Image (tube, helix red, strand yellow):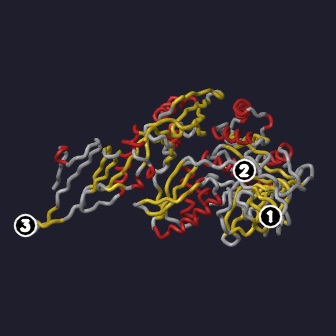
């Protein structure tokens, strides 16, 4: 175990984690130049297209240090976006050390701080690394000052590298070997291994990625999952070096894979502890936290006949994405589907795209919403994340919505614009503090529902890309909640209903009506699209009828008159009553 190092790379998004992992892999000779490609650990097309890491990926690197000893480096590359912090948390549980990567031009950002605190929660040894020192705007001395003031780490321990050019990689590998601690474990104790990830193989079933804490794993062992009590026979164990390399055994401290012929996915839970069925461990490994979904949306197949295929696809995806939560749902307009919980909008977007690409599903999604708590007049308390389950307003005593504390890091010249954005999104208790010369951290308490749609895009826009954000969930606070229904020709479309704050209801309903008016093709009759709260219309647009050719008494074709009417003032009435009747020949 003295010659094993388990570590992960953590950083803010786009600070060069995947590029640094590429250089470490090349330096350790795991892949030759002919087979190498950029972002080699990012196996999904969507990751490579967007240039982001979505899944934590692990690889075992053999490294011969300058002292002549052979080391086994188990590297886990983690995502940087706030939506995938659950992936980061699971990776940290499998490590003893972490490389905290900081951009030499941008410096310490929101996710840098958030990931540092996560690593400290798990008592990891932190090695700061200053990346991108080759950039013209790089200022390593200023970054060392930020490491000292903002992070409280020793700035002189920081290793300066350029992952793009390969500068400083040898020094970094030596620092990993000498500054990060080896794993601790008891090789003679009963088997105890953490299941930190899994993949699905069509031929071999579930492939479990594990970190062995105590004991050893070998083929032929009767394996027990402590959460579900299910037992399986181990067929193969091995190390991951871009492909699976079978081994005779996995010993305490090692990270690798296990194949045990697991075809049913229902009993598998990421974070579970594996043990020997004949000599089980006394207690599971502590510290694993379930992901708490923040955003909810319903997924429906475009063709109802594909519902069974969607069920299997979501089961397999859930195995590879432990943060996804789902339950069965149905809609009168769209048929059977699933109500899913996500960690954020990017997570939702990625899940949708993975289902469409990897499992060939055609999907319709309902509007994202958050989970509200409602107290009824009879004292009963319920939680509602689906507008279809919203109770009768007459029976509602109070409604509460989740609030978050957003920490936004930016240059000080953008403070006014960002404060205005927070105020527009019903932000309260907005404060700011100066971290270093010219850098400000602004903290604001905001309703989660207001951050869902375009808050992050607006923040990036008004700070010209220099602003970064991280958030944590605070509590639930009282709100004036209403249910907005969308009616098409007087018929309510339940899949388009949404729960919003009363102040934002008209604005949201109008946007929906206008979008539907652009999307729905014209018919030979007018189609009224209305946004309503109960029986009150708060927004309306009308799709005009198509032009049909009629024959006049002289035999010449003439066009039928078209009426055009759009009422967004909140009232219902025909064109004549509102004085807006117009016709054209």
Label 3 sits on residue: 553
Check whether the beta carbons of the residues at disc 2 and disc 3 lie within 8 A of each other: no
Label 2 sits on residue: 91
Instruction: Tell me how many marks there are.
Output: 3
Tell which of 531 and 349 is nearer to you: 531
Check whether the beta carbons of the residues at disc 1 and disc 3 lie within 8 A of each other: no
Q: Position of residue 66 (x, y in %)?
A: 90, 49
Vertical order, 201 against 472 (above or below): below
Residue under the point 73% across and 61% down: 229
Q: Position of residue 25 (x, y in %)?
A: 76, 56
Vertical order, 460 against 574 (above or below): above
Q: Who comes first in sequence, dot 2 or dot 3? A: 2
Q: Position of residue 188 (x, y in %)?
A: 90, 56
In the picture, measured across the screen, residue 565 lies left or right of residue 252, that is left
Label 1 sits on residue: 238
Check whether the beta carbons of the residues at disc 1 and disc 2 lie within 8 A of each other: no
Between disc 1 and disc 3, the foreground one is 1
Residue under the point 74% across and 52% down: 76
Q: Residues within 10 Å of mark 1 (few under 14, many from 20)?
A: many
Residue under the point 80% across and 46% down: 96
Q: CA distance from mark 1 to mark 3?
A: 87 Å
Q: Who comes first in sequence, dot 1 or dot 3? A: 1
Q: Who comes first in sequence, dot 1 or dot 2? A: 2
Tell which of 458 and 445 is nearer to you: 445
Q: Position of residue 345 (x, y in %)?
A: 54, 49
């Amino acid at each position: 175990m003295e010659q094993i190092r388990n570590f992960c790379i953590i950083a803010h998004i786009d600070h060069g984690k995947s590029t640094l992992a590429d250089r470490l892999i090349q330096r350790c000779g795991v892949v030759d130049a002919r087979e190498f490609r950029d972002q080699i650990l990012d196996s999904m097309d969507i990751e490579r297209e967007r240039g982001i890491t979505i899944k934590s990926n692990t690889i075992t690197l053999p490294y011969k240090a300058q002292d002549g000893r052979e080391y086994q480096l188990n590297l886990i590359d983690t995502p940087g976006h706030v939506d995938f912090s659950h992936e980061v948390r699971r990776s940290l549980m499998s490590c003893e050390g972490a490389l905290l990567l900081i951009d030499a031009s941008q410096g310490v950002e929101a996710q840098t701080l958030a990931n540092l605190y996560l690593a400290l929660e798990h008592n990891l040894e932190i090695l700061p690394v200053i990346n991108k020192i080759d950039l013209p705007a790089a200022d390593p001395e200023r970054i060392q000052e930020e490491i000292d003031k903002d992070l409280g780490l020793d700035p002189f321990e920081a290793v300066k590298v350029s992952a793009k050019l390969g500068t400083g990689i040898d020094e970094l590998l030596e620092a990993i070997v000498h500054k990060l601690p080896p794993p601790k474990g008891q090789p003679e104790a009963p088997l105890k291994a953490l299941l930190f990830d899994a993949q699905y193989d069509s031929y071999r079933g579930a492939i479990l990625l594990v970190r062995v804490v105590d004991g050893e794993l070998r083929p032929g062992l009767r394996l027990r999952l402590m959460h579900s009590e299910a037992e399986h026979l181990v067929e193969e164990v091995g190390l991951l070096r871009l492909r699976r390399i079978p081994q005779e055994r996995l010993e305490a401290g090692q990270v690798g894979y296990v194949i045990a012929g697991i075809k049913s996915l229902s009993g598998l839970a990421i974070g579970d502890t594996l043990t020997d069925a004949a000599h089980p461990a006394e207690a599971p490994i502590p510290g694993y936290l379930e992901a708490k979904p923040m955003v909810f949306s319903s997924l429906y197949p475009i063709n109802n006949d594909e519902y069974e295929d969607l069920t299997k696809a979501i089961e397999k995806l859930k195995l590879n994405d432990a943060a996804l939560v789902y339950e069965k749902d149905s809609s009168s307009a769209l048929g059977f589907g699933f109500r899913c919980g996500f960690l954020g909008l990017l997570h939702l977007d990625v899940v949708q795209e993975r289902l469409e690409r990897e499992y060939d599903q055609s999907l319709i999604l309902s509007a994202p919403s958050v989970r509200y708590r409602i107290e009824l007049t009879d004292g009963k308390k319920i939680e509602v994340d689906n507008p279809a389950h919203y109770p009768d307003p007459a029976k509602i005593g109070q409604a509460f919505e989740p609030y978050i504390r957003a920490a936004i890091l930016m240059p000080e010249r953008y403070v006014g614009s960002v404060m205005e954005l927070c105020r527009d999104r019903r932000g309260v208790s907005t404060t700011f503090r100066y971290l270093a010369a010219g850098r400000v951290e602004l903290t604001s308490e905001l309703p989660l529902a207001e951050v869902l749609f375009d808050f992050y895009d607006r923040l990036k826009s008004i700070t010209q890309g220099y602003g970064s954000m991280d958030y944590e969930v605070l509590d639930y606070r009282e709100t004036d909640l209403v249910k907005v229904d969308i009616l098409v020709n007087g018929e309510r479309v339940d899949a388009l209903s949404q729960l919003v704050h009363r102040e934002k209801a008209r604005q949201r309903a109008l946007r929906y009506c206008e979008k539907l008016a652009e999307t729905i093709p014209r018919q030979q009759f007018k189609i009224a699209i209305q946004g309503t709260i109960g029986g009150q219309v708060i927004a309306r647009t009308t799709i005009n009828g198509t032009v049909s050719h009629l024959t006049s008494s002289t035999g010449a074709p003439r066009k039928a008159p078209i009426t055009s009417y759009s009422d967004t003032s909140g009232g219902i009435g025909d064109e004549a009553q509102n004085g807006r009747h117009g016709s054209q020949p």
